[in-house]
Amino acid sequence: MRRKIWLIIGLFILGMSGCPLPETSVTNAANEPVTEQVNVPATEAMPVSTPHKTAKKYSGVAVGNRRLWTESVNTPNGFDRASRALILFYALELDRQAENKAFNRASVNKWLAKELNLARQNYQFAAKTCQSNDWTCITPANNSDDFIAKASELRIPAVLDEWQEKTAEFMGIYVAEQIHLAALFPTTSSEIELFNDNEWDGDKTADRKFFLSFDDGPTASGGNTDNVLEMLAAQKKSAVFFVLGQRFANRQKTNGAAAVAQAYKGQCVGAHGWEHLSHEKRSRYAVGDKWQSSVTDTIALLKTSFDGTAIFLPLFRPPYGQRKADSGAFFQKEGLQVALWNIDSQDWNSRIEAEDIINRMEILMLIKRRGVLLFHDIHPKAQKAVPVIIKDFGSAVEWGNCHQIAVF
Ligand SMILES: [Zn+2]
């Protein structure tokens, strides 16, 4: 019911701001076979169109529909082909939204330049499996401008029109999400940017390698955390659980410390702070408290709890990704790395379902090609979404062991 209401509101907003209509110059070539292409496979000789432009304003969460791309993505070749198509659309959208007016241009421009460069580099990885007569393959680009120019000339099979429409919409919303974070930085920090070398976000992971992470737990015994742990065991995968000290201590009180330590066997655990409060603006919420003690108290609890095991990792993930700009020296002194992420599921958001999370994460994994996936074990969606994502990508990707997450 709630979903239906959001859909109606979403359609209304889209109606207000203009639907993602194709450009007038776009060739709607349903009845116009392309004649200049010769010696191409039948599927490539179909009518084509150039990339659709997106509407200027979007709201909501970027979800998309990955399944409109009907070829399989569970082999390296299949993964790369879908990846090339999505990276090119992503780069075009980064370029398009660079023209939009936003506050804090310096931070936004810095992020856009970094992200475009990353997109071009990632495309090069994806292009290793390029074969001739493939519309997703463009010649190597020397720089971002060259990359955009070549992406603009894409000729996309018209059979992919629906995919293209939905992809353009996804990119519009996703890039706007990210620009919003970049515009807020550093007044409000997040995963969008790093302050120093002691922080990481997953962008430097090896190509086609991904790590799983789950925040905000643990839940009470028999709850969602236990379901996620069971799911991971069944999938033979490991993840880092960034736990809240208070919730962890409560569960120990109820179940006993040994049982809690046993529950995380085969997994990794890092700290997410004592309570779920911003560690950048904490004084607003808890006058007199110091954010450092939220970190050190949680770390001390975890070290004691997992003593003699390899489960504890000296990692801190700040709630909302918010940490103080000058916190580097403190984390270095404590021997902790700041563990962020580069692929955000938004699974906490009540507007989206497990199926939406699968679509969003698969599209983002194809664009980013590497990194750290953020989920929340306190919500029921990840335990449904993760097995599908693992199955869909099959042997195309490598799922890193949680102990290697900080070794890039
Ligand atoms: Zn959190």
Image (spheres, rainbow, N blue to C red):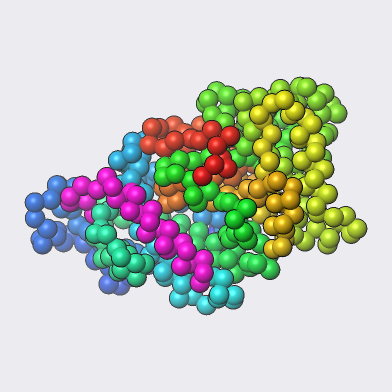
Which of the two residues, 313 or 323, is positioned nearer the viewer here? 313
Which of the two residues, 402 or 160, is positioned nearer the viewer here? 402
The span shown in magenta is 109-135
Which residue corresponds to the image point at 65% horizontal and 50% vertical from the top-left?
338
Which residue corresponds to the image point at 57% horizontal and 71% vertical from the top-left?
107
- Determine whether, in the image, residue 403 is placed left or right of residue 245: left
Q: Position of residue 376 (x, y in %)?
A: 64, 41
> Which SS does the magenta portion mostly show?
helix
Q: Quadrant of residue 94?
A: bottom left
Which of the two residues, 364 or 397, is positioned nearer the viewer here? 397
Which of the two residues, 122 or 177, is positioned nearer the viewer here? 122
Q: Position of residue 85 (x, y in %)?
A: 33, 53
- Residue 201 visible in the snapshot: yes
Q: How many marks?
A: 0
Q: Position of residue 82 (x, y in %)?
A: 34, 47
User: Relative to 350, is 103 above or below?
Assistant: below
Residue that sits furthest to the right in the current view? 288
Q: Quadrant of residue 158?
A: bottom left
Which residue corresponds to the image point at 75% horizontal and 54% vertical from the top-left?
330
Taking the magenta stretch, the answer to whether it contains residue 233 is: no
- Determine whether, in the image, residue 120 is placed left or right of residue 259: left
User: Relative to 242, is 201 above or below?
Assistant: below
Q: Position of residue 374 (x, y in %)?
A: 59, 45
Residue that sits furthest to the front in the current view? 333
- Residue 392 visible in the snapshot: no
Which residue corresponds to the image point at 41% horizontal and 55% vertical from the top-left?
166
- Determine whether, in the image, residue 302 is placed left or right of residue 15: right
Taking the magenta stretch, the answer to whether it contains residue 123 is: yes
